[in-house]
Image (cartoon, rainbow, N blue to C red):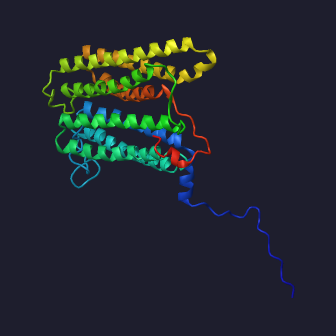
Amino acid sequence: MTTPAPTAARPDAPVRRTSLLARFLAWVDAHPRGILVANLAAQIGIIVTGGLVRLTGSGLGCSTWPQCEPGSFTPVYHPETALHSAIEFGNRTLTGVVSITALLVAIALWRMRDRAKGLRVLGLAPLTLVAIQAVVGGITVLVDLHPAIVGSHMFLSLILVAVSTYLLVRVGEGDAPGRTVVPAPGPALALLSGVLAVPMLALGVVTTGAGPHSGDEEVGYRFALDPALAAKLHGVSVWVYVAAVVALAVVVVLAARRIAASDRAELVRAQHALREVAVVIGLQAVIGYVQYFTGLPIVLVLLHMLGAALSTAVAVRLVLSVRVRPTLASTTPLAARHDAV
């Protein structure tokens, strides 16, 4: 009896499927920049939805935390509170999106084995800050929207935008030590602009808390501050920030005129960053003054809060634009890139 020859595998035979986890990790490894962009967009987006909660007085649309209502994680709708409940619950739902993107950032950066360890560890920052934000958000509800807690909630969101912007810029660079491309005093002015952005943004948060949009539509002006004075101090901080940016712009323009055309490519990043700041801060100034003289309409205040998030992002990009960080040579030991953040 003749033994039949083994049957060759058919060309159309099913190939063993890659595990779901392996496919997920492959997708993460292939799209780190997309993940970082999505994370930054989510961090900015939740500032807008959080602002909508504040401006519509919907902070207690869910009466408790982590549940929305006692015994229910979803709103219990009543005709008189339906809109507030929907807005607050929608903002809480977006927190889940922010958490997912922050987790993806942590995974994507940690898996970059060929990058600086400091950068990979910093990838955990968004996830850590989101967790802290969730706790602060819960405390905000439990203390009946105290403006100090509401303000800290907003400022933490701005910090998240700053960290997310830094990571997005940093991943596009190498891990070699940074080298300045703008002559003195350009780097010092860039750093000064970043420092001055902090009180500018903080005073903006305080100004909102001092005014009628502090988070509780039934109780206005919950900070014991004169809203007009707070607004003027915020305005002064903006102009001081603008002065530092203008001084940096002068340095960059003069540098571009002094060097050969072939060497100006390194200044392009700083020039783009300066244009971004000019557009965002210019629009912010227009919105700020119009809202001040028109009685703080909700739409303009919400746009101003979006502008605060964008101002944070462009301020970080400006600070980073005055230096380049080349890629380390492939022969460089991993230990040499250990501390490059």
Q: In which quarter of the image is the N terminus?
A: bottom right
Whether residue 91 is visible to the viewer of this picture, yes or no, is yes
- On the image, the x and y values in percent for residue 216 come to 19, 33
Residue at 63% in and 18% down: 262
Q: Residue 246 vs residue 73: left or right? A: right
Q: Residue 209 location in percent, x, y? A: 21, 29
Q: Extreme right residue here?
A: 2
Q: Residue at x 33, y 36 (%)?
A: 157
Give residue 148's position: percent from left, percent from top.
Answer: 19, 35
| Count of marks, rendered view | 0
Q: Which residue is drawn at 20% across and 45% down?
A: 63
Q: Taking 229 as reference, is 236 left or right?
A: right
| Residue 223, placed above or below residue 76 | above
Tell whether 95 sits left or right of 256.
left
Nearer to the camera, 193 or 59: 193
User: Which of 49 and 39 lies nearest the eye of the viewer?
Assistant: 39
Out of 236 and 49, give the one closest to the viewer. 236
Residue lying furthest bottom? 1
Among the 4 quarters of the image, the one containing residue 194: top left
Q: Position of residue 108 (x, y in %)?
A: 50, 48
Q: What's the residue at 40%, 37% (across, down)?
A: 163
Question: In this rendering, does residue 295 appear at all?
Answer: no
In the rendered image, which quarter contains the C terminus?
top left
Q: Which of 185 and 1 is in front in this view?
A: 185
- Vertically, is 309 above or below 287? below
- Considering only vertical position in the picture, is 207 above or below 247? below
